[in-house]
Image (spheres, rainbow, N blue to C red):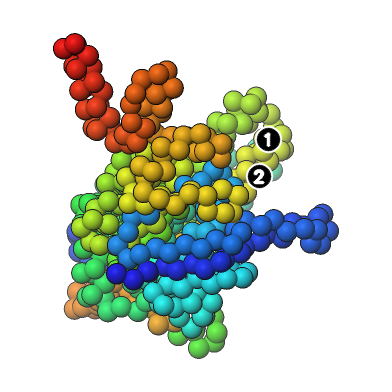
Amino acid sequence: MLKDITIGQFFPGNSLIHRLDSRFKIIMDIAYVVMLFTASNYLGLIAVGLFMILLYIMSGVGLRLVLKSLRPIMPLIAITCILNLFFIRGSGEPLLNIGGVIMIYPEGITTSIFMAVRIMFLIIGMSLLTYTTSPIELTDAIERLLSPLKKLHFPVHELAMMMTIALRFIPTLIEETDKIMSAQKARGANLDTGGLIKKAKALIPVMIPLFVSAFKRANELALAMECRCYRGGEGRTRMKQLHSGLKDYIALAVMAVFFAELILLNIYIPYLGIPYMVP
Amino acid sequence: MGDIIKAENIIFEYPVLDEDGNEVSRTRVLDDVSLCVPEGQFLAVLGHNGSGKSTLAKHFNGILLPMSGSVTVDGMDTKDESRIYDIRQTVGMVFQNPDNQIVATIVEEDAAFALENLGVEPKEIRRRVDEALKTVDMYEYREHSPHQLSGGQKQRVAIAGIIAMRPRCIVMDEPTAMLDPKGRKEIMKTIKLLNREHGITVVLITHYMEEAAQADRVVVIDKGKILLDDVPKKIFSQVELLRSVGLDVPQTIELMYELKKSGLDVPDDLLYEEECAEYLFDMLTAGDKK
């Protein structure tokens, strides 16, 4: 179960998407999310979808990974669908009416499909950023983008450092959790059966050793960092510099044009096919 | 050549606390230890668990400061806070668990960490990182993520992160304790390469006798005091003394020791496998001729 997590994983490559400046990629990713929520009809959604598919083809990230990234959020999508299905009240006759309590309208069906597709596009699109950008570049970019906040005494460097270390230790701690779970199972711990509360309680003997070891690791890491002359962000240089070039500005321009088109689409064809409102 | 590390009469104590956090007594970890490490030497520090050998190592680059006495690194006192980064750059330190020393998510980024902290120019960092990774033979793994590597490889990355600073001395605190035999061999090879080819002074803290036997000089620590300080051959021939402080002896020495005890006239300082095997071979073939 723990090994299925693909969100936040990096898949090295050399495509144009990989080579874009990570700062621009973050900005474009945010723009993509805004775009997705601006698209208020199917036409807009399909347009955003096609744009996203085009980017994926350019990046060379495989379809299997895309599907894998969707798996953990399936329950969320299902809940959204069900809620929309039952609670959206349409103007016409309900398709299904059970005692006046459960009523399904055509609007409910279209809305729930719309919402499900939107959430899927959201996750798939945002995953592209982490698939094509190394964690180091990502934290670097965040540090650079947030650097104006330094003037407000916001600990930007520390935040970026914490993110790097967290990313570095995720696989280590996952491995460790697996080991502790096996060790506790070997001592007769029952981790897999029982209700939710019982299961949560059974995790205590896993969590405690994990925390103890995490603190020990933190202590040793701090020592090792001190030995390598770490003294915060002041006066620090970076081996890999972020370079923005013509391609980054072109990419940003393409994104802006696309965004503008989407807004026009919203204005001129507000409710194509479905009587659905802007969220 | 002069001494790169000079420790004079250092004393270090840990406070022993009761349940309320009050100090009840003090445990003396280092008791009046004096030790000089000449530049270019490969020194092994041997000792049982709790003998104080790790505490001693942490004094060599100012991680711990002595309660009395002094430690000087290339003429700089470790108590001098203004020079602490010069000291840490001169004496690098490698720890036991490679996992807990690697900061970055990519091998080459980790090797660059120290240089980035020191504010070196990006181009110079690139050059020194490549050089360091080539020295420890991890260059082709430079774009890997540390969790894809074996223990020995991770430890070599940790060493690269230190040698990128171009230290003149490296202190290694049981760098092989968590590794498999293959990883242990890799690290010993790297250590010897650094010492012989690059002239870096090495202080190796260990409890493996086979590793200590490869050093130029061995210091045995017991209960916070220096017990023995000599070349490996002289140290390991004192089998009873070593055993009395909870240390083992290399298999070659043990074999000779047992042979001697059972009445054979053999030397007791045949430390290295080849010389031991050669001696036994000569002895046995001579016996055949008779």
Q: Position of residue B114 (x, y in %)?
A: 37, 69
Residue A202 numbered mark, or none:
1
On the rendered structure, is A127 left or right of A223? left
Q: As rendered, which of B229 and B100 lies closer to the eye?
A: B229
Helix, strand or loop at label 1? It is: helix
Judge from the rendering whether residue B114 lies leftward or rightward of residue B81; answer left or right. Answer: left
Chain for numbered disc 1: A
Residue sitting at the far left? B289
- Please tell me whether mark 1 or mark 2 is closer to you in this view: 2
Task: Say what amino acid the circle numbered 1 marks.
Answer: Ala
A121 lies above or below B6: above
Label disc, if present, on residue A208 of the rendered structure: 2
Relative to the observer, which residue lies in front, B167 or B5?
A: B5
Q: Residue at x 79, y 61 (%)?
A: B23
Q: Nearer the viewer, residue B252 or B123?
A: B252
> In front here: A30 or B92?
B92
- Which residue, as the protein is rendered here, is positioned at the far right? B20
Q: Position of residue A224 (x, y in %)?
A: 46, 61
| Mark linked to residue B117 | none
Q: Give the residue displayed 56% in from the left and 44% down from the top.
A: B49
Q: Tell me: B34 left or right of B279.
A: right
Q: How far apart are the alpha carbons under marks 1 and 2?
A: 11 Å
Label 1 environment density (alpha carbons within 10 Å; few <14, some 14–19, many ≥20): some
Residue A80 visible in image: no
Q: Is residue B17 above or below residue B251?
A: below
Q: Amino acid at mark 2?
A: Ile
Residue occupying the point 27% across, 57% down: B195
Q: Which element type, helix, strand or loop, lies under badge 2?
A: helix
